[in-house]
Image (cartoon, rainbow, N blue to C red):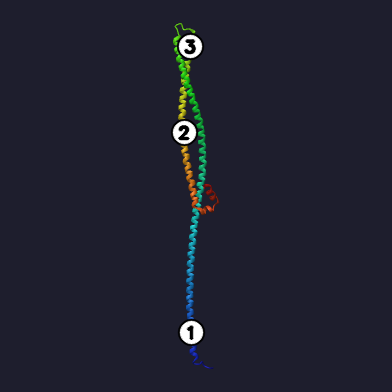
Amino acid sequence: MASPQPTEVPGMEKSLEEMHTRILELQSLCSLLQESKEEAVRTLQRKICDLQARVQAQEEQHEEAQKAKEADIEKLNQALCLRYKNEKELQEVIQQQNEKILEQIDKSGELISLREEVTQLTRSLRRAETETKVLQETLAGQLDPNCQPMATNWIQEKVWLSQEVDKLRVMFLEMKNEKEKLMVKFQSHRNILEENLRRSDKELKKLDDIVQHIYETLLSIPEVVRGCKELQELLEFLS
């Protein structure tokens, strides 16, 4: 068997050295690639964790916002129900007040009629008093000691007229007292009506404030309103 030539040995050794060097370079490159890959994986994992945290935070924020919107809608529904209830009660109060006012108008007409009757009675009383005075003067000139029948008739008529005057005076006083009572009652009803009217105005002011608050709340949550047909109709109704 022929032995290698001396010139071939150094060339082979050189090739082996070059191969060893390349192997080392490849190993180093593989190590760098492995480290780069691991770093990329770690970076990607961090990004994924950050994204997951952001998604979770956004979901929680969205859930809280949704709960807040649902709470606002519930408040709006309650306020709307309260408004309808107050409107119904106010309509009933107004109807009652209208009935009382009409009743008071009737009583006012009765008071006017009573006042006219008192005036007529006063005139009759004065006329009767005048007639009585005239009769007294006439009787004073006609009566004599023998007391003729005509004089007796005059005395009877005088007594009758005096009685009528007393009756008219009593009726006049009764009418006057009744008038005063009606005036007191009328003033009392008037005070009650004015107080009820003031309360009605106050309730109307409260209702207007509630409606304005609902309207402003709906304007402040346009996204919620766009997603709810009932709220859109309510906003159009309040506009």
97 or 138, which is in the foreground? 138
Q: Secondary structure at mark 2?
A: helix
Q: Determine crowd level at label 2: few under 14, some 14-19, many 20+ residues with C-alpha closer than 10 A.
A: some
Residue type, numbered disc 1: Glu
Q: Please tell me which of labels 2 and 3 falls first in the chain.
A: 3
x then y, percent, for residue 92: 52, 39
Q: Determine crowd level at label 1: few under 14, some 14-19, many 20+ residues with C-alpha closer than 10 A.
A: few
Q: Residue at x 45, y 17 (%)?
A: 130
Locate the N terminus by quadrant.
bottom right
x then y, percent, for residue 67: 50, 54
225 above or below 85?
below
Q: Which residue is mark 3?
A: 154
Q: Secondary structure at mark 3?
A: helix
Q: Please tell me which of labels 2 and 1 falls first in the chain.
A: 1
Q: Residue at x 48, y 11 (%)?
A: 154
Q: Which residue is mark 1?
A: 18
Residue type, numbered disc 2: Arg
Disc 2 or disc 1, which is closer to the eye? 2
Tell me the distance, in whole angstroms, between the alpha carbons under discs 2 and 1: 121 Å
Q: Which residue is mark 2?
A: 190
Q: Is residue 233 left or right of residue 129?
A: right
